[in-house]
């Protein structure tokens, strides 16, 4: 990891920060304004019409269940990772990777034998769906996550065994779905990343809240809330290719986060904001899709 020593007392003291950090400040302020505008000017949800993909058959105590895996370009894609990277994360039980998907309402249908059944439509990003078509591993992962998501949302118990319908892309009809409108037009929110609690030093310092945004196409922004601090004195920050580690003075804070993207640690920059938060800009080594 490359230790960043770029923390400054206040972001608004641009004359003391140098040209590069001042440019970083301008970028953060611009992003903040865009977020506020998006939140106030856009509706909370929008309606989409998912496109058919493939259908899997399983069952519950109520009878046959069909899951229509659909796709839409309106749904954001997951972070770009190789299958080897993803497999390693899953083996280590790390929660840094998620697949955005929209879970539709159940609808009653009739199967090929005229018997009653229940169908659910689950939509993922269209580009990710095309990638999934060429990968048995990704397809099985999506089906597993979709099944678990439906179980959680509708209090179901679905059979983990399923069968792919080869000659039927969907069961019944695919209905329109309401999804949350994107609140950050140029910025893709990555969601939660894995934080290694087991790596905290003794004394259990507080784990601060971490927000991540992907500034298309090759810049990751991080915001770490530090309400107990008035300045950057005593803060330490280390950034590796896929990890961010921060320590606070007097063991007040400790954060160790795995980030599922390749970071250019040598070019990363950080600054302490007057609103008691640490802002970090991390260029990416490879642009996510």
Image (cartoon, helix red, strand yellow):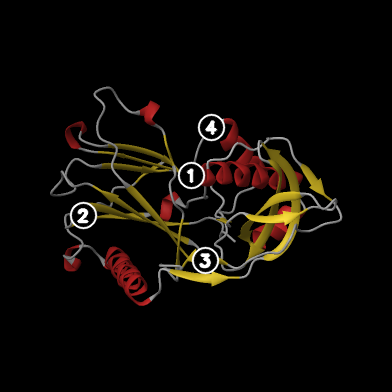
Query: What SS does tag 2 mark?
Result: loop
Snapshot quadrant of residue 36: bottom left
**Are circles 3 and 4 on residues that touch, CB within 8 Å?**
no
**Are circles 2 and 1 on residues that touch, CB within 8 Å?**
no
Query: What SS does tag 3 mark?
Result: strand
Figure quadrant of the N terminus: top left
Q: Earlier in the sequence, mark 2 or mark 1?
A: 2
Q: Earlier in the sequence, mark 2 or mark 4?
A: 2
The x and y percentages for residue 95 are: 50, 39
Q: Is residue 153 left or right of residue 50?
A: left
Q: CA distance from mark 4 to mark 1?
A: 16 Å
**Are circles 2 and 4 on residues that touch, CB within 8 Å?**
no
Query: What SS does tag 4 mark?
Result: loop
The x and y percentages for residue 189 are: 44, 58
The x and y percentages for residue 5 are: 28, 48
**Are circles 3 and 2 on residues that touch, CB within 8 Å?**
no
Residue at image mark 4: 93
Figure quadrant of the C terminus: bottom right
Residue at image mark 3: 178
């Amino acid at each position: 990891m490359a230790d960043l020593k770029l923390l400054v007392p206040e972001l608004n003291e641009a004359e003391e920060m140098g040209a590069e950090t001042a440019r970083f400040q301008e970028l953060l302020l611009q992003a903040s304004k865009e977020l506020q505008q998006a939140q106030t000017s856009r509706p909370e949800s929008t309606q989409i019409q998912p496109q058919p993909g493939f259908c899997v058959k399983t069952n519950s105590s109520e009878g046959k269940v069909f899951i229509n895996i659909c796709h839409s370009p309106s749904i954001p894609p997951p972070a770009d990772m190789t299958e080897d990277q993803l497999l390693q994360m899953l083996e280590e039980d790390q929660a840094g990777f998620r697949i955005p998907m929209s879970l539709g309402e159940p609808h009653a249908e009739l199967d090929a034998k005229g018997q009653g059944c229940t169908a659910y439509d689950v939509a993922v990003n269209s580009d990710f769906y095309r990638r999934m078509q060429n990968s048995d591993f990704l397809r099985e992962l999506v089906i597993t996550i979709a099944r678990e998501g439906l179980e959680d949302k509708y209090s179901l118990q679905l059979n983990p065994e399923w069968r792919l319908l080869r000659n039927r892309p969907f069961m019944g009809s695919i209905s329109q779905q309401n999804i949350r409108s994107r609140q950050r037009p140029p910025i893709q929110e990555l969601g939660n990343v894995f934080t290694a609690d087991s790596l905290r030093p003794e004394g259990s310092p507080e784990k601060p809240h971490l927000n991540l945004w992907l500034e298309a196409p090759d810049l990751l922004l991080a915001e770490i809330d530090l309400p107990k601090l008035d300045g950057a004195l005593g803060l330490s920050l280390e950034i590796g290719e896929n990890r961010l580690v921060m320590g606070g003075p007097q063991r007040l804070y400790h954060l160790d986060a795995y980030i599922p993207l390749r970071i250019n640690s040598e070019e990363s920059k950080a600054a302490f904001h007057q609103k008691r938060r640490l802002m970090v800009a991390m260029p990416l080594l490879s642009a996510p899709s």
